[in-house]
Amino acid sequence: MRITFKGGVHPTEMKELSLEKAFEFLPIPNQIYLPLSQHAGKPARLIKKKGDTVKKGEMIAEPDGFISAPVHSPITGIINRVSSITTLNRTRTNAVIINRNDNDEEDFMVPLNTESVTRQEIIERVKLAGIVGQGGAAFPTYVKLSPPSDKKIDYVIINACECEPYLTRDFRLLLEKTVELIAGLKLILKATGVSTGIIGIEDNKPEAIKKLSSHLKEEKNIFLKVLKTKYPQGAEKMLIKAVTGREVPPGKLPFDVGCIIQNVGTAILVYYSVAKGEPQINAFLTVSGLGINNPKNLVVPIGTPLKNIIDYCGGLKETARKIIAGGPMMGYAQFDLNSPVSKATSGILVLTEKEASRTKESNCLNCGKCLSVCPLNLAPTRLYKLTRFSKFEEAIDMGIQSCMECGTCAYNCPAGIPLVQWIRFGKLKSLALLKQRTN
């Protein structure tokens, strides 16, 4: 019997729309909008100015602090201006607008020998490449490769679950970049000084399981762990529980239980940065939904506006009603097609009325269905009510900051209450209170 976590849901997968679509390269746009904040932590500090010519791969903004990441130009062109834009997660940030020119000259880093490269060289290369986690949080990867010295790490776990409906980005990477994934995992193991690597994958991906199993036959310290298909199996705490049986306590991180989690795409980017000297300038993403004419899996230059992607996929159908960045469970609805793709964008979904419809909101039924599916054993309706009535101190005590906003509660709510939106708002308000407590 497979170890799994309490709760979770089984939404309709809808992966068949793009499952068989190999990656295509989106044509390079004539103008990009490059956000200076594409990662957890402080925005990068711009080191270029209006009118400067930049090359593809050239750093245009440097890290500003420990939790920060540089930004590189994905095209060769001229900096037009710096302007405030709306990102795909609906926040405002400064972005560098670059006009492409006909010169596609590159400015990559010098490739390193993957066999002789040292631990510190890997970490430094990943930092300079501006690689951030591809699982959604966009945490600077080099920080994860440098756990506290007092933490003993036993496992590096690759998250290959891709439990969000519609998304097939990671599945295609598993099939098309198998060698690069394994090579990237080996570099991560070397960088962290960990001897054992595990690839956790849900059992709804038999083709990828077969290919990975074949490539791992000769590997002595990398193992494939096939997991039960259930949302949110790919969440860090759930994945660790399923793979190792260990539980991450509230307020703690994976390295507190001896684990480091990396996404499939992250491991591949680590390999590219070391072996080819490539910074992170592209996003791998799925474009899907019944409201788009031609679902695809794409390699997209970061900073590309949504409109370019939608047009390349045949445009919107008349039945299209909602556009989401990310997956349908944790993604953000979009209102501006000029908003650009960032480093961690995993998907663009165009949903019809039927796909996007939800139960008409009514009063809480006190049925307990949200409690039964919450993988973190929280009380979503209680947190929602505390937030609604501005009782943020009580919400903190009830563990609102532990919520990972996975959406299982809202998905299972027969009253149609937008629980995640309320809890997300409550987390923002309670975070301000927590900062006041520490000051």
Image (tube, rainbow, N blue to C red):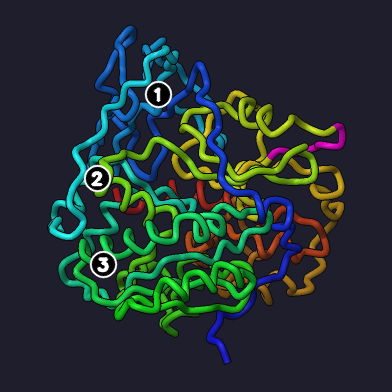
Name the residue that disc number 2 marks. Answer: 127
User: Which contiguous range is marked in magenta?
Assistant: 318-323
**Which of the labelled discs sits on residue 75, or is there none?**
1
Q: Residue 64 location in percent, x, y?
A: 25, 35
Q: Residue 188 location in percent, x, y?
A: 28, 62
The answer to which of marks 3 and 2 sits earlier in the sequence is 2
Q: How many marks?
A: 3
Q: What is the C-alpha distance between the residues marked 3 and 2?
A: 16 Å
Residue at (43, 46) in percent of width and height: 432
Q: Main secondary structure of the magenta part?
A: strand
Label pair 1/3, CB-CB below 8 angstroms: no
Left or right of residue 204, residue 182 in this image: left
- Of the residues tagged 1 and 2, which is closer to the observer? 1
Q: Secondary structure at mark 3?
A: helix
Question: Which amino acid type is shown beneath numbered disc 1?
Answer: Ile
Q: Residue 217 location in percent, x, y?
A: 39, 79
Report whether residue 436 is seen.
Answer: no
Name the residue that disc number 3 marks. Answer: 189
